[in-house]
Amino acid sequence: MPVFRARTLRKAAKQRTNRFEMPRTMPTATTEMLGFAAAALTTLCWVPQAWHTIRTRDTRAISLWTQVFFALGIVLWLAYGVLLMSWPLIGANAVTLLLVLTILSMKLRYG
């Protein structure tokens, strides 16, 4: 009886760990559209700040270190997107990096 119980417990433990594994499938169209929508919204939120900074040249309220670390984080997200070949990640982070580098260059130039 103990041998049967040990096998049953091992089998149950194995089933429990397999139950939580994510399936290894290609992203569906719905998943990709969700990614594109999220990427568009989070990228477009930087357009007003960049436009305001370019137009007014006022960068006093912008933290230099926040922009530097944010730009470095975006570079890493962009690299991650390239490694995964995920177009929502690549497109959003390339555009966001361009906008953030614009703000950062204005901060360095005008203080």
Image: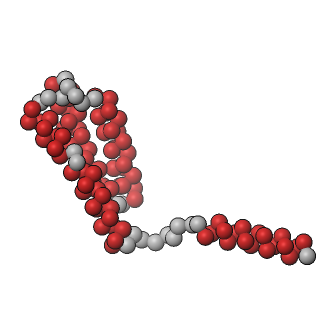
Give the number of marks. Answer: 0
The location of residue 73, given as percent across then percent down, is: 36, 42
The location of residue 72, given as percent across then percent down, is: 34, 39
Relative depth, front residue between 24 and 36: 36
Q: Quadrant for the C terminus, please.
A: top left
| Residue at the image position 28 percent from the left and 29 percent from the top | 63
Vertical placement of 64 versus 34: above or below? above
Residue 5 can be seen in this image:
yes
Query: In this view, which residue lies farthest toward the right?
Result: 1
The location of residue 10, given as percent across then percent down, is: 77, 69
| Residue at the image position 32 percent from the left and 56 percent from the top | 89
Q: Quadrant of residue 59?
A: top left
Residue 95 can be seen in this image:
no
The location of residue 35, given as percent across then percent down, is: 33, 62
Vertical placement of 9 versus 96: above or below? below
| Residue at the image position 37 percent from the left and 72 percent from the top | 28
Query: In this view, which residue lies farthest toward the left?
Result: 55
Q: Quadrant for the N terminus, please.
A: bottom right
Query: In this view, which residue lies farthest toward the top?
Result: 111
| Residue at the image position 35 percent from the left and 35 percent from the top | 69
